[in-house]
Amino acid sequence: MPPSTLAPSSRPLSGRYLSFAEREEIAIQHAQGGGVRQIARHMGRSESTISRELRRNAATRGGELEYRASTAQWHAERAARRPKPAKLAVNATLRTYVQDRLAGMVVAASGAAVPGPTVPWKGRRHGPRKDRRWALAWSPEQIAHRLRHDFPHDETMRISHEAIYQSLYVQGRGALRRELTACLRTGRALRLPRARSRGRGKLFIVPEIMISERPAEVTDRAVPGHWEGNLILGLESSAIGTLVERTTRFTMLLHLPRMAEHGIGVRVKNGPPLAGHGAEAVRDSIAYTVSSLPEQLRRSLTWDQGAEMSQHARLKIDTGLDVYFCDPHSPWQRGTNENTNGLLRQFFRGAPI
């Protein structure tokens, strides 16, 4: 079946794919001696896109990698034809190799068991995984990289980690046993759509309290009274809080003792935060700690988007601190606190906090 993009009524190609006109431009630039980076800058494309195009779709007749636009277009159209047989479905040796490592049951030719990757138990993983079996299993990415080591000269024994995930999740490409999804570290039987994960966010985060709205005086560190904070988690769900003043680097620790009911009875999922670092406990500890400071030293507090700060509005009323939140996965936005926490983790290592 030819790709749908070749139909007369089809819409133009999206910007993700190279068009024939772009391939002509690549051929001209390449013939003039232009390098990959120069061509990429001229066309506004990624360097990896140009490099991959010159490598994959070049003419190979006579053993020479001469790039021609018409030949490259033919290669691209042929590769886009669907359906295509899944690699795991037609290569039994590769399929067995992948399944054994996904299941954590790897045996060498001598009969000895091959140890899998070391996966320490952190006590925070949940999901419908098979009991402890996932701790012996290899991840698809580990399998994909290991193939190059075990079969360095066999190009048929190559597969990407994405192809393994698709074989597990996508109906019609299921060359692997579906029950192997229980051995993945996520334990998901279905892939989580990106759109759903993108839409996730903290309900207490609004644009007005993001770090981009923080006053300029906080950035230049000229005025004291602006703090950065976070939690340091220890063994057995223990934690301490840290507050670091940006100008003087003065550090205060927050005492977060466990609740009286902690350790009594069976642990309840989504129950009250008995470990002592829930939102209410953190709010009370910050308010108690900063209340000893003069009012001019209580200007703002920058925190990451942890759920322990969900009561930031009440904290502002109690202390007068303007609370701001960093962008997701951006710890460098509170670098002073991150550096201090690294030193404290080294000091507290090996014992419950």
Image (cartoon, helix red, strand yellow):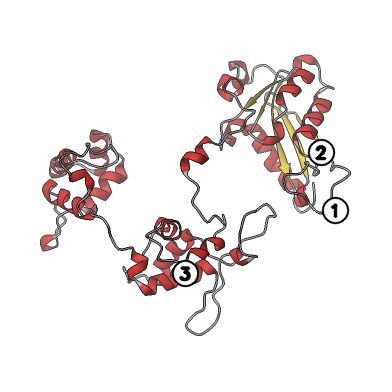
The answer to whether residue 151 is left or right of residue 289 is left
Give the CA distance from mark 3 to mark 1. Answer: 40 Å
Quarter in which the N terminus is drawn? bottom left
Q: Which residue is mark 1?
A: 265
Give the CA distance from mark 1 to mark 2. Answer: 21 Å
Q: Which residue sits at x=72%, y=30%?
A: 244
Q: Earlier in the sequence, mark 2 or mark 3?
A: 3
> Is residue 278 positioned above or below 264 on the image?
above
Give the CA distance from mark 2 to mark 3. Answer: 46 Å
Question: Badge 1 local density, few (<14 within 10 Å), some, or many (20+)?
Answer: few
> Which is nearer the eye, 26 or 314?
314
Q: Which mark is residue 256?
A: 2
| Residue type, numbered disc 1 | Gly
> Which is nearer the eye, 181 or 94?
181
Quarter of the view holding residue 89: bottom left
The answer to whether residue 174 is left or right of residue 84 is right
> Is residue 216 positioned above or below 6 on the image?
above
Place of residue 94 in the rendered image (x, y in percent of width and height, measured from the top left):
39, 71
